[in-house]
Amino acid sequence: MKKMFYAVLAAALLPVLFLARPAAASTGGTFDASNQYSNVGLILFYDATGRYRCSATLISPTVLVTAAHCTDGDVGSVLVDFRNFIADTGPSPYAPAADPSAGYTDQEIADMGFVSGTAHTHPQYSDFTDMDNWNDVGVVVLDEPVDIAPATLAGLGTLDQIGTNNLRKTLFRAVGYGTEVRKSDTGPQNPTPQSYPLERRYVDMPGQKLTPQILQTNGNERDVFGSGGTCFGDSGGPVFYQGEIVAVTSYGYTSNCRYLGGYQRVDIAVTQDWVNSFLS
């Protein structure tokens, strides 16, 4: 836990289970069986403390947008997997790096049949310390282009056009590879984030609050307007409004992912200008 937030939402990939890291998975939501969001991928990477997963979205043939807490401190190359379904149960389907302290090599990722890339972090990322300068956005630049139709970033100020009185009536769609929140097959029966299935899901969430940096939503599957929220592993995944990306998943307020979620805006100049610099 960082400050009052659970970094939504990166998840550590160990042989069987996932641990939390500043980053979230789906509470409720729907499996993307039709592969509607084929440009949303799982990213897998190492840092000094272990191996983690996040979500990211292709916005050009070689560039994905994600969260800064999913790129900050990464070592080695980033593995990108665009499959909508990965695994029902453990153990992890991904081989470990030969040298975890150095992270994945491009060859190790290629041998597994996936795409490799390099992580970049917004230079003004505040590491969850400054709500006025949050800047929790990162990119992954692929070593080779992929033949997948990219998503589109929303124009500057898109969210500002939603009136304050209409925000709670507006649904936003989050997509990612976050953990499912449900009762465990064994042991305590309180709904908690589970390691599997590992698959791409989407949820619809009503708006709750908008700041110059952050979109906040209500992420409870029992909400009368929405269908769920984000959780561990959804970090960096896209939030769509009218079919365009307005934010990426940044943080959650509770360990069971059933309350408010926070999303870094990418419709503001300080984040979008930096992301667009990788597209020129």
Image: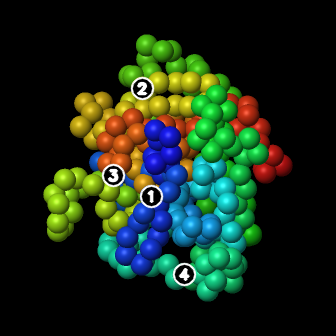
Q: Mark 3 and mark 1 in contact (Cβ < 8 Å)?
A: no
Mark 1 neighbour density, 10 Å: few (under 14) some (14–19) many (20 or more) = many
Q: Secondary structure at mark 2?
A: strand
Q: Secondary structure at mark 1?
A: strand
At a point 47% along the width and 31% down the height, the residue shown is 216
Residue 130, quarter of the rendered image? top right
Type of amino acid under label 3 = Thr
Instruction: Tell me if I can see residue 79 in this picture.
Output: yes
Pinpoint residue 269: horizontal percent, then vertical percent.
73, 31
Residue under numbered circle 4:
96
Q: Nearer the viewer, residue 146 or 197?
A: 197
Residue under numbered circle 1:
20
Mark 2 neighbour density, 10 Å: few (under 14) some (14–19) many (20 or more) = some
Label placed on residue 70: none
Q: Give the farthest residue toward the front.
A: 3
Q: Nearer the viewer, residue 137 or 62?
A: 137
How is the protein colored in the picture?
rainbow
Q: Nearer the viewer, residue 213 or 7?
A: 7
Instruction: Tell me if I can see residue 202 in this picture.
Output: no
State whether residue 220 is above or below residue 224.
below
Residue under numbered circle 2:
208
Task: Point out the frontmost of discs 2 and 3.
Answer: 2
Pinpoint residue 186: horizontal percent, then vertical percent.
17, 68
Q: Mark 4 and mark 2 in contact (Cβ < 8 Å)?
A: no
Residue under numbered circle 3:
30
Q: CA distance from mark 1 to mark 4?
A: 18 Å
At a point 72% along the width and 46% down the height, the residue shown is 122
Q: CA distance from mark 2 to mark 4?
A: 40 Å
